[in-house]
Amino acid sequence: MGAVSNNRIEITPVHSFKPSIQQHWFIYTISLFSILLAFTKFGVHAITGICLLSTSGLLIVYCILSVYTTKYIITHQGIMVRKGPFFRKFKELTYGDINNISVRQGSMQKRLKVGNLVINTNQCRRILRGIKNPQKIKELINKEKSSAYERRTSLRKIL
């Protein structure tokens, strides 16, 4: 269980992970093609070349920032998700709310050994993108979910 300090609950993570940067392979490919096109066809002095360079650069920077600022934490109580560079707080999905977990992988994602976890609850649907070894993470979540259920039922029997 978590310890309380300064009115904040500290949660002990079971597993903490970040998405893989390889998940954005298509965006990087298109952006690099745009940069190459900007230099060879339009040049950096033409407005079209400058627009292509700045748009591609901003897209690459945003993708890199979103990967490095996204964090997923599996705890004994649920899954905590913080996505993207503009969010500071974690959103929590408790195991009691989770109805279904599925793995989605495209052909390129299978080659890169990354995938997306789709977590369905009654209220929302969360997609954890770019997870390395998504099957293992799904198994870990299901294992923690079943142990949380066992803890709740054994606590009810005691009370």
Image: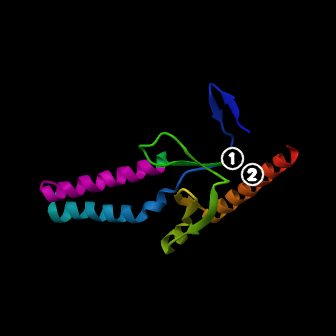
In the drawing, does residue 29 fall left or right of residue 15? Answer: left
Q: Dot 1 corresponds to which residue?
A: 77
Q: Which residue sits furthest right?
A: 158
Q: Position of residue 138 (x, y in %)?
A: 65, 62
Q: Dot 2 corresponds to which residue?
A: 148
Locate residue 46: give its quadrant: bottom left
Magenta span: 44-67
Local secondary structure at mark 1: loop
Give, as a three-letter code, the residue at label 2: Ala
Q: Quadrant of the C terminus?
A: top right
Q: Which residue sits furthest left?
A: 46
How packed is label 1: few (under 14 Cα within 10 Å), some, or many (20 or more)?
many
Between 119 and 50, the one lying in front of the other is 119
Residue visible at 56% across and 63% down in the picture: 118
Residue visible at 26% across and 60% down in the picture: 35
In the drawing, does residue 91 fall left or right of residue 138? Answer: left
Please tell me whether residue 77 is drawn above or below residue 121 in the rendered image. Answer: above
Between 118 and 156, the one lying in front of the other is 156
Q: Are marks 2 and 1 in contact (CB under 8 Å)?
A: yes
How packed is label 2: few (under 14 Cα within 10 Å), some, or many (20 or more)?
some
Q: Main secondary structure of the magenta part?
A: helix
Give, as a three-letter code, the residue at label 1: Gln
On whether residue 59 falls in the magenta region, the answer is yes
Between 32 and 81, the one lying in front of the other is 81
